Amino acid sequence: MQKRNRNSWSFIPTQYFAEGIPFVLVNQLSTAMYKSLHASNVFIGFTSFLYLPWSLKLFWGPFVDAYATKRKWTLYMQLFMAVCFLIMTFIVRMNSFLFVSLFVFTIVALLSATHDIATDGFYLHALDKKDQAFFTGIRSTFYRLAMIAAGGVLVKLAGDIGNKSGSIINGWSAAFGISAALFFILYLYHSIILPYPDTDHAVKTSGQKIPYGLIFKAYFTQKKIGVILSFIMLYRFGEGMLLKMAQPFLLDSRDVGGMGFNISDIGIMYGTFGVVALIVGGIIGGWLIKKYGLKKLIWAMALSMNLPNILFLYMAYAQPHIIWNLDFSFFIKMFGMNGNLIYTVNPLVQLCLIIEQFGYGIGFTSFMVYLIYVSRGEYKTSHYAISTGLMAVGMMIPGFLSGVVQQSVGYFWLFAISLLLGIPGMIPIFFLPFENE
C-alpha cells in the first residue's frame, strides 16, 4: 500500500544528502581533480559553465511540474546519476579524459539540476508550512554533510590512494566508484521510503500545454520584483569569484602565490573541518532566524558571509607557513589496532578557513530562507527553480572569469576583487519585501 505520509526524518536527511553530492562532485571535486592533473586555472575557471544547468533549470522547472510526480523524477535522476558516476570510474583512465570527463560532468549537472527541482518540489508537497520552516536547517545540514563526504572524505581518499599507488588517477577512479555505489543505494532506499503526498501530481492534463506564461507572469509580477532579482543575482557574486579559485590557491605552490598543500590536505582542511564550520554556521543561522525573524537579521547575516573573505586576502598576502604535527594515534589504539595517525596542519590557514566557512554558513542560510519566501502559489516548485536558477547565474559569471582574472593579476588581487564584489549584493537588502515572513 502506498503511504501518503511518513516521518519526515526518514527521508529529508537522505534526500538532501543525495542533492548535495553531485553538485559538489561537479563544481568542487572536479576542480581539485583537474588541478591535480595539471589543468590550468583558466581551464578550471571556464568549467564554471557547469553551473549553467542550475542557471537554466528555471526553464524546465515547469516541465518537471507538468509531467509525472516529483517522487518519480527524484528516483529516476538518482538512478541515472549512479550510472554516470560508474562510467566516470573508467573515463578518468582515458588519454583524452579531460574533455570526455567534462562532457560526463555536464550530463551529471543536467541530471542533478533536475533532481534539485524535483527534490525541492517534493519537500514543498510532503511537508506542511510549519515543518518546512523547521526542516530548513536540517536539510541544509545534510546538504553540507554531503559536502564533507564529496569534497572532504572522497578527496582525502583519492589523495591517499593516489599516494599509495603512485598514481592520483587510481584515487579519482575509486572516488567515482564509491559515488556510484552510494547513489545506487540511495535510489533503492528512496524507492521504498518516500511517501506519496496527495498534492504531488502532474499539473498538466492531457491536451494541455505547459503554462509557461502563467508561471513566469506569477513570479515576475511579484511586489518589488526588481529588488528581489537584484538580491538573488548579486548576493553570491563575490563568492563566485572566490570559490572556483579557492582550491587552486590552496594547491598551487608557494612560489606562484599559492599555499602548497596536497590533495589529502585539501580533503581535511577545506573539505572536512571547513565544511563542519559551515554546517555549524548554517544551524546557528537557522536557529537565529527562527528566534528573531529574517527581517531583523538578514543584513548582519549578509555581512557575516562576505566580510570573512578578507581572510583569503590575508592568506594570499602573508602566506603563513606554520606547521603543526598532531598525533591522533590514540584513536586507533583505542580500538586495539596498531598504526599511526598523524595530522599535519597549518593552524593559521585552518583557522582562516574555519572562520570563513562559518560566516558563509550563517549568510547562506538567510539567503535560502528568503528564496522560499518568494516561492508561492500552485507553481511554487517552478518559482523556487527560477530563484535558484538565477542564483546560479550569479555564481557562474564571476566563476567563469575567475581563472582569467587570477592569471592576470594573481591570487591577492583576485581575492581583493571578490571582496569588493560582495558589496552590491548587500545593497538590495534594505529594500526587500518581507510581508510574508
Image (spheres, rainbow, N blue to C red):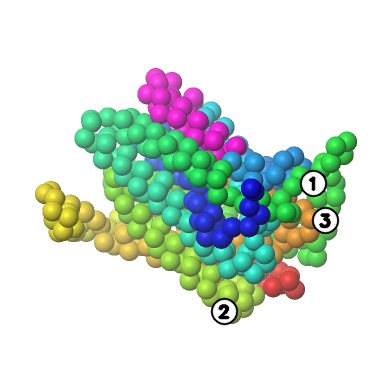
* Contact flag, marks 1 and 2 (Cβ < 8 Å): no
Identify the residue shown where x is 78% and y is 59%.
377
Q: Residue at the location (65% across, 75% down)?
A: 295
Label 3 crowding class (10 Å Cα cut-off): few <14, some 14-19, many 20+? some
Q: Quadrant of residue 11?
A: bottom right
Task: Give the Cα separation between the discs numbered 1 and 2.
Answer: 36 Å
For the residues marked 3 and 1, what is the alpha-carbon distance in whole angstroms?
16 Å
Earlier residue among tags 3 and 2: 3
* Front residue of this view, candidates 341 and 418: 341
Please identify, in this view, whether the residue under mark 3 or under mark 2 is nearer the observer.
Answer: 2
- Residue 68 in the magenta stretch? The answer is no
What amino acid is at disc 2?
Lys
Residue type marked 3: Ala
**Which element carries disc 2, helix, strand or loop?**
helix
Q: Residue at x 36, y 31 (%)?
A: 173
Q: Which residue is mark 2?
A: 291
Residue at far top of view: 95
Q: Which residue is under mark 1? A: 203
**Measured from the top left, where is residue 219 in percent x and y?**
78, 55
Q: Which residue of the protein is positioned furthest toward the front in this rendering? A: 1
Residue placed at 34% from the left, 58% from the top? Answer: 273
Q: Residue 218 shows which numbered tag?
A: 3
Q: Position of residue 300 (x, y in %)?
A: 55, 74
